[in-house]
Image (cartoon, rainbow, N blue to C red):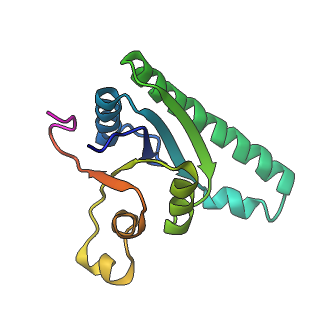
Amino acid sequence: MFRLKRILLIAPAEMTRTPAFDRAQALARASGALLHIVAFDHVQSLALAGLIDHDAMAQAREGYLQMHRQWLEQQARFQRGAGVQVSTEVVWARATPAHVLEYINDFRVDLVIKDAHHVSALNQTFHQPLDWLLVRDCSACVHLVTEAAHPKPL
């Protein structure tokens, strides 16, 4: 039987609670696994501002990341209240397949949970969505969560 020890939840950069949070909490509680929540965040305007004034950009970026860390920690507190071991991290990087796969391999997780995002057929022609690249290239199991009416496993 496959035993889960470490679960990674890839949280959206928009700081919104999604069905994947509930699914990850339910699976971590049922399996007794450690849940780690990571958000990849990168604001292009802050990065461009760094070309003009590096110190001001670094301070603005750190303030923005601190706000994101606090929001993620608040979400983790909800899950700790349900009896789940949770850790959080905000990474200043674009959520490109290379960054995400490198993070997953370094963290050595058993299961990756992420919200599935609908991509139109036209957009798929020119751009491969991160969801499907993870399914194809990730060494860990990938669980994509949709906007289902019942996000928790029954």
Judged from this view, the residue extending furthest toward the bottom is: 125
Judged from this view, the residue extending furthest toward the front is: 1
Number of numbered discs on residues: 0
Coordinates of residue 84 in the picture (x, y in percent): 41, 24
**Is residue 98 or residue 11 the one in the foreground?**
98
Q: Residue at x 52, y 66 (%)?
A: 96
Q: Is residue 104 above or below residue 123?
A: above
Q: Is residue 117 above or below residue 132?
A: above
Q: Residue at x 40, y 33 (%)?
A: 33
**Is residue 58 or residue 111 the one in the foreground?**
111
| Magenta: main secondary structure | loop
Coordinates of residue 136 in the picture (x, y in percent): 35, 70
Highlighted range, magenta: 150-154
Image side of residue 73 versus residue 51, left or right: left
Q: Residue at x 55, y 49 (%)?
A: 107
On the question of residue 123 being in view, the answer is yes
**Is residue 27 or residue 38 the one in the foreground?**
27
Coordinates of residue 132 in the picture (x, y in percent): 33, 67
